[in-house]
């Protein structure tokens, strides 16, 4: 009878061992697959001056499976070139820093950027990051007023427009190399009119103006 019990119990032992092996294999397989991508630090909105460099970046947690990084601009994949590059580097914490670099930024680069990451388990998309390009503000520019330029019997009249409260320096030259200051005029209202009486004795006369 004891020998008969061994024969009955043996298949049960084999079945139990098989279940343990399958459970171990499932846990091991899950550990190999890991988790979907996780974005630790989202990309942020950025404003840069025209012609400067813009860097938009995100920090991503490491996973057990390889990750693929895709940057998008206004819903379309970013096309890299000499001025637009992408790098993915690992820091000391083994996190991946994915950075999109836009050099010589101009109005064509302004818009919405986002990062999409995929691996063997799933995918993740970052929040939107808006890049704004600002044109430099010129506060000390002087302009010649076309309607205020006229050559008469008494000389050449010049009208300038610029920031109110400034001093306008007018220079003249006959060869664009040697310049001589001919007038310094205060412009309390931002406009100055000057008459160059010596212009009648010069065959060629060039003018420029600036705020000292």
Image (spheres, rainbow, N blue to C red):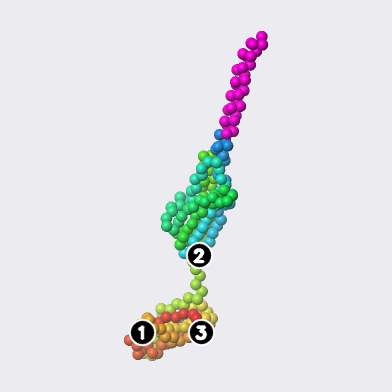
- In-image side of 56 versus 80 (left or right): right
Q: Residues within 10 Å of mark 3 (few under 14, many from 20)?
A: some
In this view of the protein, which residue sits in the foreground, 59 or 180? 59
Q: Distance between the Cα atoms at labels 1 and 2?
A: 38 Å
Q: Residue furthest front?
A: 3
Residue at the limit of the structure toward the right, as seen here: 2
Q: Secondary structure at mark 2?
A: strand
Residue at the top extreme of this rendering: 1
Mark 3 vs 1: CB contact within 8 A: no
Indicate the quadrant where residue 155 lies: bottom left
Q: Can residue 189 be seen?
A: no
Q: Which residue is mark 2?
A: 49
The residue located at (63%, 16%) in the rendering is 9
Picture quadrant where residue 35 is located: top right
Please say if 14 is above or below 107.
Answer: above
| Depth order, front residue of 55/3 | 3
Q: Earlier in the sequence, mark 3 or mark 1?
A: 1
Dot 1 corresponds to which residue?
174
Overall secondary structure of the magenta stretch? Answer: helix
* Pointers 1 and 2 in contact (C-beta within 8 Å): no
Residue situated in front as seen by the camera: 140 or 79: 79
Q: Nearer the viewer, mark 3 or mark 2?
A: 2
Q: Residues within 10 Å of mark 2 (few under 14, many from 20)?
A: some
Q: Earlier in the sequence, mark 3 or mark 2?
A: 2
Residue 93 in sight from this viewpoint:
yes
- Residue 8 circle label: none
Q: Which residue is mark 3?
A: 186
Q: Position of residue 192 (x, y in %)?
A: 47, 83
Q: Position of residue 6 (x, y in %)?
A: 64, 14
Q: Residues within 10 Å of mark 1 (few under 14, many from 20)?
A: some
């Amino acid at each position: 009878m004891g020998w008969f019990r061994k024969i009955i119990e043996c298949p049960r032992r084999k079945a139990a061992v098989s279940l343990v092996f399958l459970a171990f294999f499932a846990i091991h397989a899950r550990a190999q697959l890991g988790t979907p991508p996780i974005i630790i630090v989202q990309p942020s909105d950025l404003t840069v001056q025209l012609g400067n460099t813009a860097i938009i970046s995100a920090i991503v947690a490491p996973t057990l499976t390889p990750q693929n990084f895709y940057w998008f601009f206004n819903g379309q994949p970013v096309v890299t070139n000499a001025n637009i590059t992408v790098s993915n580097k690992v820091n000391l914490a083994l996190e991946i820093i994915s950075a999109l670099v836009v050099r010589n930024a101009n109005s064509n680069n302004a818009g919405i950027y986002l990062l999409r990451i995929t691996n063997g388990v799933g995918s993740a998309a970052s929040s939107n990051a808006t890049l704004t390009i600002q044109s430099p503000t010129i506060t000390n520019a002087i302009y010649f007023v076309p309607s205020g330029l006229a050559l008469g019997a008494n000389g050449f009249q010049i009208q300038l427009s610029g920031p109110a409260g400034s001093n306008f320096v007018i220079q003249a030259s006959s060869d664009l190399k040697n310049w001589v200051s001919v007038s310094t005029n205060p412009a309390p209202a931002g406009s100055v009119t000057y008459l160059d009486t010596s212009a009648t004795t010069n065959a060629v006369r060039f003018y420029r103006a600036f705020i000292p």
